[in-house]
Image (spheres, rainbow, N blue to C red):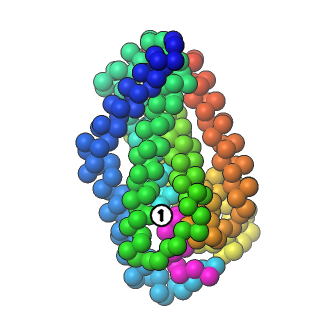
Amino acid sequence: MNLQGLFISYYTIVRKELIRVFRIWTQTFLPSVITSVLYFLIFGAFLGSRIGDIEGLPYIAFVVPGLVMLAVVTNSFTNVAMVFFMSKFFSRNIDEILVSPTPPWVIISAFVTTGIIRGTLVGLLVLMISFLFTHLALANIAIVVLFLLLTGLIFSLAGLINGIYAKSFDGIMIVPTFVLTPLVYLGGVFYSTESLTGIWHTLMYANPIFYLINGFRYGVTGVSDVSLSTSFAVLFGLAIILTLINLYLLKKGLGLKQ
């Protein structure tokens, strides 16, 4: 397949999904926005003043980066997992893509792009809404954007793996509910690592979302519990591993053959 053919395949998949995302915006964007407003009200207006400052930041300012990451993680993951699952079992158009000369890396790139776009847009919406509840100066805009995109990339790749293997809607929803959400909450959204001791402090460093939250928190507030170089190393390594897994699954047809 020549370069033009590769672009047409990539563009067709991305365009089809983005049209769906924006057409049903009340399902793809609004729920995360409403949930975030509730979080900001609870931790800003009700609890924040009683808890006090953490690492020199008002509590609401401290939790904003984690809540933004929660929105990006869940939207990126769910979007790709659900779309691929639907394409596999209902519309069946994934069969047409797989029998076409479109190489696996183009298929992965297209589906992941849609997850990155949705996740990033939702994250930006949540971040903008947070300005209504607290003052954020954004310490480093480049880091903010980079971690939004990196988070979308990693969890879109993870969502694609889930979508490839899922056999039912339960197989799609069980991962965000019982894996992703706990990892986000245990990744330092509501507390600093200094508040943990013993094994819990050690286990936090095994949670990849911990590095996402702290990298993004550094971009927003200038505060982080771990160095940026460590966060980048862990996250780029994870992205490479997930990419290789997806390439292997698509080439072998594992989870796709009915």
The stretch of residues the image draws in magenta is 56-66
Residue 46 x %, y %: 40, 83
Which quarter of the picture shows residue 12? top left
Which quarter of the picture shows residue 223? bottom right
Pointer 1: what residue? 67
Q: Rate crowding at label 1 as few (under 14), some (14 to 19) or many (20 or more) other CA atoms within 10 Å.
A: many
In the rendered image, the quadrant that contains the C terminus is top left
Residue 53 x %, y %: 57, 84
| Lateral position of residue 140 relative to residue 226, left or right | left
- Identify residue type, mark 1: Leu
Residue 189 in view here: no
Please give the count of numbered marks on the rendered protein.
Answer: 1
Residue at 55% across, 25% down = 105
Residue 122 x %, y %: 40, 54
| Lateral position of residue 83 relative to residue 256, left or right | left
Residue at 72% across, 72% down = 197
Residue 40 x %, y %: 40, 72
Whether residue 255 is in magenta: the answer is: no
Residue at 72% across, 49% down = 233
| Lateral position of residue 165 relative to residue 25, left or right | right
The residue closer to the viewer here, 176 or 111, is 111
Residue found at the very far front of the displayed protein: 4
